[in-house]
Image (cartoon, grey):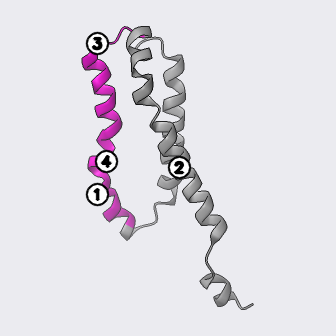
């Protein structure tokens, strides 16, 4: 098979890895809402502080159009890797937080 023909083939492995990572990212970040009552109790959060956690979690969606425009003009491969990594680390550290 020629080099050009290989590049034209659908990259199933890459697509599956990307979609799987995206699914894990969305599932993992979705655990904040069900855990809010636990955080309110264990960290002595007020309802306002707990609500601010949800606001901060949703805030990046405001910037999504800007990131999309930037992604159309440049290679943001690092962002695709770092985004889920930062979410995973931050959500994991919530379990060991001593205070908000």
Pointer 4: what residue?
Answer: 61
Quick one: label 2, few (<14), some, or many (20+) residues within 10 Å? few
In the foreground, 9 or 72: 9
Q: For numbered disc 3, what is the local secondary structure? A: loop
Q: Nearer the viewer, mark 4 or mark 1?
A: 4
Q: CA distance from mark 3 to mark 4?
A: 25 Å
Q: For numbered disc 2, what is the local secondary structure? A: helix
> Pointer 3 and pointer 4: residues touching (CB < 8 Å)?
no
Residue 42 location (% of width, % of height): 44, 9
Q: Which mark is residue 66?
A: 1
Pointer 2: what residue?
Answer: 23
Q: CA distance from mark 2 to mark 4?
A: 17 Å
**Residues rendered magenta in the picture:** 43-71
User: Residue 35 sits in which quadrant?
Assistant: top left
Q: Is residue 80 left or right of residue 43?
A: right
Q: For numbered disc 1, what is the local secondary structure? A: helix
Q: Who comes first in sequence, dot 3 or dot 4?
A: 3
Residue 25 belongs to magenta span? no
Quick one: label 3, few (<14), some, or many (20+) residues within 10 Å? few
Residue 59 belongs to magenta span? yes
């Amino acid at each position: 098979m020629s080099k050009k023909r290989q590049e034209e083939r659908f990259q199933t492995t890459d697509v599956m890895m990307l979609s799987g990572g995206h699914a894990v990212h969305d599932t993992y970040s979705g655990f904040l809402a069900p855990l809010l009552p636990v955080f309110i109790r264990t960290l002595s959060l007020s309802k306002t502080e707990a609500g601010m956690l949800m606001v901060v979690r949703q805030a990046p969606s405001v910037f999504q159009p800007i990131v999309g425009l930037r992604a159309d003009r440049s290679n943001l491969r690092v962002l695709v890797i770092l985004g889920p990594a930062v979410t995973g680390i931050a959500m994991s550290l919530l379990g060991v937080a001593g205070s908000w």
